[in-house]
């Protein structure tokens, strides 16, 4: 019974998160896509230079 409640809560959280993510994509896609692309590009460059441990060390 607890497992059923837990899974239904997770499913409700996923559906609501999906709705909010879709709304954010609809409203802020023009602003967020270049920023997100630049962020992932910088993350990739840092990962290539320092590796995963370098990213974790900088985040601390």
Image (spheres, rainbow, N blue to C red):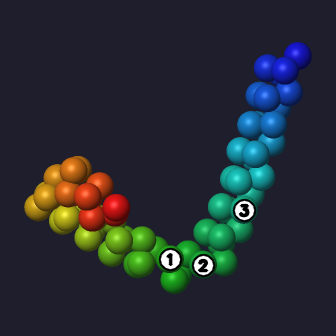
Q: Is residue 34 left or right of residue 8?
A: left
Return the x and y of residue 21 as percentages of the image width and height. 66, 61
Q: In the rendered picture of this protein, how many numbered marks are placed on residues?
A: 3
Return the x and y of residue 40 as percentages of the image width and height. 33, 65
Q: Quadrant of residue 57?
A: bottom left
Q: Is residue 25 left or right of residue 57?
A: right
Spatial CA distance of label 1 from label 2 is 6 Å
| The N terminus sits in image quarter | top right
Residue at position x 71%, y 44% from top? 14
| The C terminus sits in image quarter | bottom left
Residue at position x 76%, y 37% from top? 11
Residue 9 tag number: none
Return the x and y of residue 55 as percentages of the image width and height. 26, 58
Mark found first going from the N terminus, 3 or 2: 3
Q: Are marks 1 and 2 in contact (CB under 8 Å)?
A: yes
Q: Which residue is mark 1?
A: 32
Q: Secondary structure at mark 2?
A: helix
Q: Which residue is mark 3?
A: 20
Residue 28 tag number: 2
Q: Which of 60 and 36 lies nearest the eye of the viewer?
A: 60
Q: Which of 28 and 56 lies nearest the eye of the viewer?
A: 56
Q: Secondary structure at mark 1?
A: helix
Spatial CA distance of label 3 from label 1 is 15 Å
Q: Secondary structure at mark 3?
A: helix
Q: Is residue 56 left or right of residue 2?
A: left
Q: Quadrant of residue 47?
A: bottom left
Q: Which of 40 and 56 lies nearest the eye of the viewer?
A: 56
Mark found first going from the N terminus, 3 or 1: 3
Residue extending farthest to the left is: 49
Residue at position x 60%, y 78% from top? 28
Is residue 52 positioned above or below 30 on the image?
Answer: above
């Amino acid at each position: 019974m607890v497992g059923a409640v837990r899974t239904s809560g997770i499913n409700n959280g996923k559906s609501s998160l999906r709705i909010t993510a879709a709304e954010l994509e609809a409203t802020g896609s023009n602003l967020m896509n270049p920023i997100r692309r630049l962020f992932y590009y910088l993350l990739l460059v840092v990962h290539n230079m320092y590796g995963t441990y370098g990213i974790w060390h900088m985040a601390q």
